[in-house]
Image (cartoon, grey):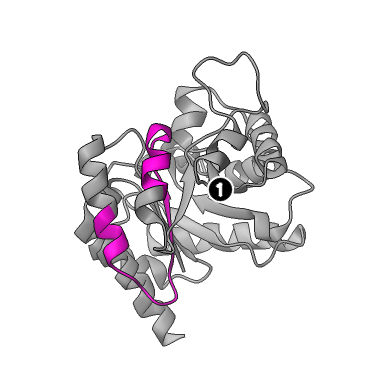
Amino acid sequence: MIIAANWKMNPPLAEAGTLVAAYAASSHDGVTRILFPPAPYLVQMAMRLDGSGIHLGGQDCHQATAGAHTGDVAASMLAACGADRVLLGHSERRQAHGESDALVAEKAATALSGGLSVMICVGETLEQREAGDAESVVIAQLDGSVPDSIRGEQLMLAYEPVWAIGTGKVAGVEDIAAMHAAIRSWLSGRGLADVPVLYGGSVKPDNADAIFAVENVDGALVGGASLKAEDFDAICAAAGRLVATR
């Protein structure tokens, strides 16, 4: 099971130090933990997490390896700061920054060439789900966002229904199961059957057990709850309980 914390543009640096110290103070057998902090925090987080077994990733990278791109971050810079992976295609990037599937694929290819693995996010809006287009939207995003040449060990996927991110709403277990099964089928058709597929969207301690019990759910991409050490730890513990029963 994989539990990833996406801090987004949070928290203040002093709070981040306290939070990551709490992360490092606990361990969960059978659970891989990943932290995606804001880029300016990467070096300090890498130092604080040294020896903890927690992986670090960037929240985004540019599709170019270097150049005149003010405000952007190259994949090689993330790696130099201690990251071994990068989060790409999050709905907040797709919507607020107009990122297309093709751009996500281009960024992923650049990240891979720079030695990073990638976690690519996909998910439908509420309007798309209500129109009955959720699965076709997600499969189209996979087709357009995942580079053809990627190897299984370089990739993780996160299914995040856009309408559930930060809203407190969570997809029903039947909907999660259906979408994860569709994603698994797509991966199998690409020779990537073993790639982990995480669920994201208002994952909390009180719903984590039910979500993790769904077939083809390999963990969670956690937003708001990752900013509270006790909540993130409880979600990791839920993942650990599932691993212990397998």
- Residue 207 visible in rendering: no
Specify the farthest residue to the bottom: 245
On screen, residue 132 above or below 191: above
Q: Is residue 244 left or right of residue 191?
A: left
Q: Is residue 113 left or right of residue 231?
A: right
Q: Determine the image quadrant of residue 151.
A: bottom right
Q: Position of residue 66 (x, y in %)?
A: 65, 23
Front-lying residue, 204 or 186 = 204
Q: Which residue is mark 1?
A: 85
On screen, residue 110 above or below 171: above
Q: Position of residue 31 (x, y in %)?
A: 43, 70
Front-lying residue, 101 or 225 = 225
Specify the farthest residue to the right: 149
Front-lying residue, 20 or 181 = 20
Front-lying residue, 240 or 46 = 46
On screen, residue 90 above or below 48: above
Q: Residue at x 67, y 26 (%)?
A: 64
Magenta residues span 21-46
Q: Residue at x 34, y 46 (%)?
A: 223
Q: Is residue 157 left or right of residue 154?
A: left
Can residue 41 be found in the magenta stretch? yes
Q: Residue at x 42, y 63 (%)?
A: 51
Q: Position of residue 186 (x, y in %)?
A: 69, 57
Badge 1 marks a residue whose secondary structure is strand
Q: Residue at x 38, y 71 (%)?
A: 239
Can residue 175 be found in the magenta stretch? no
Q: Position of residue 67 (x, y in %)?
A: 65, 18
Circle 1 residues within 10 Å: few <14, some 14–19, many ≥20: many
Q: Is residue 153 left or right of residue 8?
A: right
Mark 1 residue type: Arg
